[in-house]
Image (cartoon, rainbow, N blue to C red):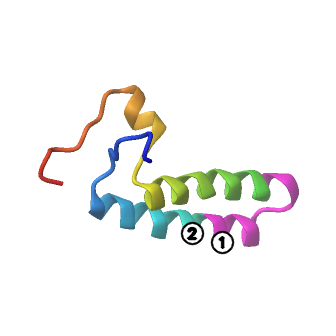
Amino acid sequence: MVFYVKNVPPGERVLRVVAGVVVAGLALRGLDGLLGWAVAAGAAGIVASGLFGFCPACAMVGRKLKQGR
């Protein structure tokens, strides 16, 4: 049972996953200590929104997909 409605289009979902993985990798490699882990955790949230197709921030501002998607 799905409790959320997808609000991220397919092309943007792919972009979120790729960008999130890149940012997380760069953060863990280029930033030391807690800051690197914090940035990587934020990037993991972006990856999750791409994988699930739901972005809570987009939902708060009322973003919805067209019915055909």
Mark 2 nearby-residue class (10 Å; few <14, some 14–19, many ≥20) = some
* Residue furthest right as drawn: 33
Majority secondary structure of the magenta segment?
Answer: helix
Q: Which residues are magenta?
A: 24-35
Front-lying residue, 37 or 68: 68
Q: Residue at x 33, y 50 (%)?
A: 8
Front-lying residue, 28 or 5: 5
Q: Residue at x 65, y 69 (%)?
A: 26
Q: Is residue 23 magenta?
A: no
Front-lying residue, 38 or 7: 7
Q: Place residue 12 in its image quadrant.
A: bottom left
Indicate the amino acid at tag 1. Answer: Gly
34 lies above or below 10:
above
* Residue furthest left as drawn: 68
Mark 1 lies on residue: 25
Indicate the amino acid at tag 2. Answer: Val
* Residue furthest front as drawn: 1
* Residue furthest top as drawn: 61
Q: Place residue 52 in its image quadrant.
A: bottom left
Q: Secondary structure at mark 2?
A: helix
Mark 2 lies on residue: 21
Q: Place residue 33 in its image quadrant.
A: bottom right
Q: Are marks 2 and 1 in contact (CB under 8 Å)?
A: yes
24 vs 15, left or right, is: right
Q: Residue 64: x percent and y percent?
A: 26, 37
Front-lying residue, 67 or 41: 67
